[in-house]
Amino acid sequence: MLTLFGIVYGITTLLFPLASAAVEKSQTGQAMAAVNLVNFFGTAVLQTASGSVAERQGPGAAIEFLAAAIVIGAIVYLLSLRNRRGNADMSLST
């Protein structure tokens, strides 16, 4: 279970190049700052929520909760790419 969690969470490192590619070069610093802010804010929110889950159902359930939250976030992100481009092409090329 911890291995699966590590693999799923490792995807978050891809946010930095994705954010950098999504904006003009002059806005790269702001995009990186936004990604960092989202990471820290998300960590604070998810730590609180997973603590609640761990208290009620144990640490295994908390790790499953975190993995599910990351998968849901990835799906929402991919759907937002699809909607933003107005087609089914979800490739990251520009």
Image (spheres, helix red, strand yellow):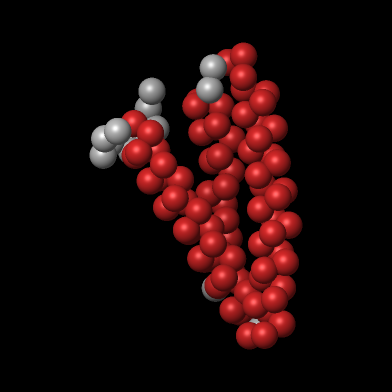
Would you identify the image quadrant in which residue 13 lies?
top right
Left/right of residue 25 with respect to residue 85 in the rendered view: right
Q: Residue furthest bottom?
A: 57
Left/right of residue 68 with respect to residue 36 in the rendered view: left
| Rendering coords of residue 30 (x, y %) | 67, 26
| Rendering coords of residue 26 (x, y %) | 62, 14
Identify the residue at image location x=64%, y=38%: 35
Q: Nearer the viewer, residue 85 or 71?
A: 85
Decide: is 15 above or below 27: below
Q: Is residue 4 visible?
A: yes
Identify the residue at image location x=56%, y=27%: 20
Identify the residue at image location x=66%, y=53%: 42
Left/right of residue 94 with respect to residue 38 in the rendered view: left
Q: Say how many tags the image has.
A: 0
| Rendering coords of residue 65 (x, y %) | 57, 70
Identify the residue at image location x=70%, y=50%: 41
Decide: is 20 above or below 50: above
Q: Quadrant of the C terminus?
A: top left
Q: Residue furthest top?
A: 26
| Rendering coords of residue 54 (x, y %) | 68, 79
